Image: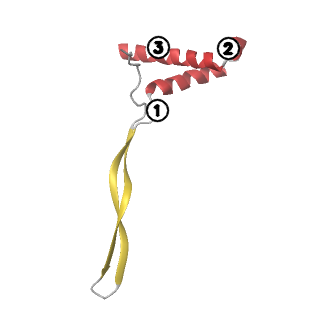
Amino acid sequence: MKEEKLGQEPAFPTKLNQVIGQTSYNFIDENGNGRIGYYNNYADIEYQGVSKRFYAACAAMQGLFANSHPTFVNAGVESLIKQAYCAADELLRQEGEL
């Protein structure tokens, strides 16, 4: 069984009421003038965004790249990514223990 990783919930979820379509209307008013227009159809759209784990790993990676120590620079990108995700996982573990 695959272990579920911490921090898979969205970091910044948001719900927006957005236009999802339009309905047209066309009629003649009481003065004999033709009226043509559109009504907007709205719906609540939920955007999940990035996961907490990815967001924390990106923040950790910024710190690792900002470090000018040659060990980090020469370690390679894959190594930096692994270190960033390890730091993110530890952060999320500690967050869950509070």
**Tag 1 near tag 2, CB within 8 Å:** no
Rounded to the nearest angstrom, the CA distance separating label 1 from label 3 is 18 Å
Quarter holding the N terminus is: top left
Give the image location of residue 17, x and y in percent.
35, 50
Q: Which residue does the numbered mark 2 point to in the structure image?
A: 75
Rounded to the nearest angstrom, the CA distance separating label 3 from label 2 is 21 Å
Residue drawn at (38%, 56%) of the image? 19
Q: Residue furthest top?
A: 71
Of mark 3 and mark 2, the one earlier in the sequence is: 2
Residue type of the residue flagged with mark 1: Val
Of mark 1 and mark 3, the one earlier in the sequence is: 1
Q: Secondary structure at mark 1?
A: loop
Closer to the camera: disc 3 or disc 2?
2
Q: Residues within 10 Å of mark 2 (few under 14, many from 20)?
A: few
Q: Residue furthest left?
A: 30
Left-right relation of 91 to 44? right
Residue type of the residue flagged with mark 2: Ala
Residue drawn at (51%, 14%) of the image? 86
Frontmost residue, 26 versus 61: 26
Q: Which residue does the numbered mark 3 point to in the structure image?
A: 90
Q: Which residue does the numbered mark 1 point to in the structure image?
A: 50
Question: Is residue 98 in view?
Answer: no
Rounded to the nearest angstrom, the CA distance separating label 1 from label 2 is 27 Å
Give the image location of residue 65, x and y in percent.
65, 22
Residue type of the residue flagged with mark 3: Glu
Left-right relation of 34 to 66? left
Which image quadrant is residue 33 in?
Answer: bottom left
